[in-house]
Image (cartoon, rainbow, N blue to C red):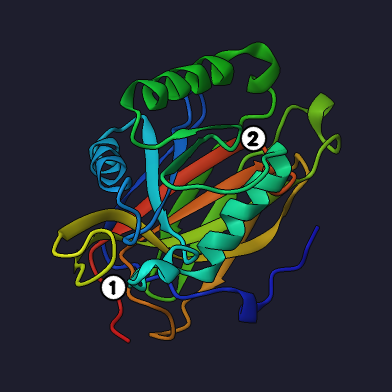
Amino acid sequence: MKQVSTAALFAVAMLAGAVTGAVAGEARPVLVELYTSQGCSSCPPADALLAELTRRKDLIAMSLPITYWDMLGWKDTLATGANTKRQKAYAAAMGRGGVYTPQVIVDGVTDVVGSRTNQVEAAIRAAERAEASAKNAAWSVGIDLSRTPQKLHVAITGAPSAARGKSQATIWIFRLRSSATVHIAAGENKGRTMTYRNVVNGIQDIGHWNGRAISLDLPHTGPKVPPHDGVVVVVQQGGYGRIIGAAYLAHADCYDQ
């Protein structure tokens, strides 16, 4: 298993919060990722839909602003290179010819245009049916997140013995802001004021899961990362395959730069 180094871990404020994730005997939440840009005129309807999805208890919905539309006259104030890299990695894994916005990726395996509500809802329902199948149930794992002022504790359950060692999965942690309001002063959305929900501003690969139960303690490293008020931990087949575990921890305080 990949060793977890302190340098690879980033800060998590852990004073008060709630966890969304699967526990034994419960269905895990479906992961919905929206790739979007402040410079994309087609994205606001998708951003509004994502905001609605963040209210659902059966989902973990995240917004991942990308950088490649900055050339259209407005530099996205929330975009990161890590978000762009993740979207491009998905395109390669899915055999797509390129990337686009707004793109929604559901549970790591299905992509649809993020502004097409019916397609997004259909992809979510398909993911829920797939998760309930006997084949996939053997690989579904529970994730428990707990926190102290010093650390975030991540506990991931094991798969049935017959499934252990047959596949490697990546353990990802995302830090995010639950809400960010931006006035867009130029570009295709000039003059609009947008509020984005569950905005990812950091992604880290923190280890591998091989089917056995594992626990990780991620140290609190201080205000060295962009402000955030939530974290999501995901277990994903390969690196950009099917999601087999996901949990979200919301907490009250975030850091200032």
Residue 22 can be seen in this image: no
Q: Which mark is residue 242?
A: 2
Residue 46 can be seen in this image: yes
Seen at 44% across and 33% down, the residue is 29
Q: Amino acid at mark 2?
A: Arg
The vertical placement of 215 against 226, above or below, is: above
Q: Nearer the viewer, residue 158 or 209?
A: 209
The vertical placement of 160 against 246, above or below, is: above
In the picture, which quadrant includes the N terminus? bottom right
The x, y position of residue 110, in whole percent, is 56, 30
In the picture, which quadrant includes the C terminus? bottom left
Q: Nearer the viewer, residue 191 or 21?
A: 191
Seen at 20% across and 64% down, the residue is 190
Seen at 79% across and 44% down, the residue is 168
Seen at 63% across and 54% down, the residue is 88
Q: Secondary structure at mark 2?
A: loop
The x, y position of residue 206, in whole percent, is 64, 63
Q: Which mark is residue 254?
A: 1
The vertical placement of 70 against 212, above or below, is: below
Q: CA distance from mark 2 to mark 1?
A: 30 Å
Q: Secondary structure at mark 1?
A: loop
Q: Nearer the viewer, residue 138 or 170?
A: 170
> Are there few (<14), some (14-19), or many (20+) residues within 10 Å of tag 1?
some
Q: Which mark is residue 128?
A: none
